[in-house]
Amino acid sequence: MSTITRSSITRRLPPAEATELRTGARHALAQVYRTADLVVLGLGVMIGAGIFSIAGQQAKTTAGPGVILSFMIAGIACLLACLCYAELSSTMPRSGSAYTFAYVIFGEVWAWIIGWALILELQLAAAVVARAWSQITVGAITNFGVRVPYPDVVATVLVVVILVLLTGVVAVGARIGLRALWVMVAAKLLAIGAVIVVGAMHIDVANFGDLYAEPQPVSGTKTTVLDFFIGQDQAFGWIGVFAAAPVIAFAYIGFDIVATAAEETVNPRAMVPKGMIRSLVVATVIYIAVAVVMVGMIPYTSISLDAPLSSAFQDVGVDWMGHVIDVGAVLGLTTVILVLIVGQTRVLFSMARDGLLPRQLGAISRAYHTPQRATLVIGAVAIVLAVFVPVLTMQELVVMGTLFAFLFVAAGVIAMRRTMPDLERGFRVPLSPLLPIASLVATLWLMVNLQLLTWAWFALWMAFGLVVYLVYGRRRSLLSLAERPPPEAGGRGRHRR
């Protein structure tokens, strides 16, 4: 079997290839996004059905009323990563996001590793969210008084329907997908706004206490990396506040997908950082507002784990809000699926365009100006995963792939400041390298709070990815082809980019 040579380790994408959009018409993506569009893209993926449940669940089991502080801590941790993404995206405005950053800064092997992690994150996430969407949709229909026969069968059919529909939307054009996204995000924000406004009218300040719940012993299997080394037998108190933060941070993950739209953004050096940071700030404020309402309406000890917000509104006599929450949850997950397909398509397209995956996936449809083949492959794989694989048990793998990319992006800011100080940057992380180092530490903290089993499955996925690179990508990448000596006279001629 081929091995990873020194050449493939040190082989880097020239900065000009990532800082200047150099492809011809066959590989050109239409520029459709502006700052407001990128904010909507970020909100589309960051605000899903979890906004109606995560605050209540973490308040009930881990942090008590201090869950509000947990949301703030998680928001700060994600903001650090977001700032790092903003600098690199403003410097290398290509659709590959962290994959492209790694290709320029660290080399081809590392780029492949990050790209492979992103494929895991986005492809699996689309299947996970589609399966969750189908179950929530069936539940919402039932809550409206409609009897659903064979709910499991109906849920499976709905998975196929939503993935086919949204894959088609992404395949036929970014503008069509963007218009649909604006409508759905606006509708779900209206639902969330109703939750916040109506819930605020029923807040009892006494339920907040001093945002502190007395520590309590807990029992359970020690499964996370952190538990393995230090153990964890206590919830609530300050330990609970910090323990809830990693779980909550997972709700914010998705701002990184905005970076995959850089190549399709007008003036990306300025607009991508603004869109990414603003979407995360807005999402954080919304999550904190919902958490305040959740904790303020009823004592945290009375929160229902199954339907925290709906049950809270029932307790205060506002039953109709349950239907608003159902509609908001369905819309929320619909936009998440749509943006995940967009992000995965752009990563796959970039890797194929660079030759690390079959070049056919890097072709642009002349009719729709989208990477149509890549989109259809992604949609088909998502359907297979969602229908035939128990994806709802694999949610942490999505998080693991994301956090792994976060590590390299933070390290990339530090490395690029030293090795490529003269590259034009539309945004700079303040207080560098202090904030990028803080991002590394915060990301590692989130990672050690994942289960040991998740780490094991992730290691297997990455090992498989290296095999794929050795067998296919190492010899077929465009940089590898460019390094080969020209053929003898009469040959086909040297490959050109």
Image (cartoon, rainbow, N blue to C red):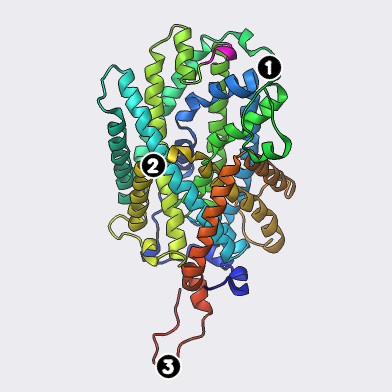
Residue type, mark 2 in image: Leu
Residue type, mark 1 in image: Ala
Residue 99, can we see it?
Answer: no
* Marks 2 & 1, CB-CB < 8 Å contact: no
Element type at mark 2: helix
Element type at mark 3: loop
* Numbered label attached to residue 213: 1
Q: Does residue 54 appear to the left or right of 493 in the view shown? A: right
Q: Which residue is mark 2?
A: 338
Q: Is residue 396 magenta?
A: no
Q: Residues within 10 Å of mark 3 (few under 14, many from 20)?
A: few
Q: Which residue is mark 3?
A: 489
Residue 455, can we see it?
Answer: yes
Location of residue 278 (image quadrant) = top right
Q: Residues within 10 Å of mark 2 (few under 14, many from 20)?
A: many
Q: Which numbered mark, 2 or 1, is in the foreground of this view?
A: 1
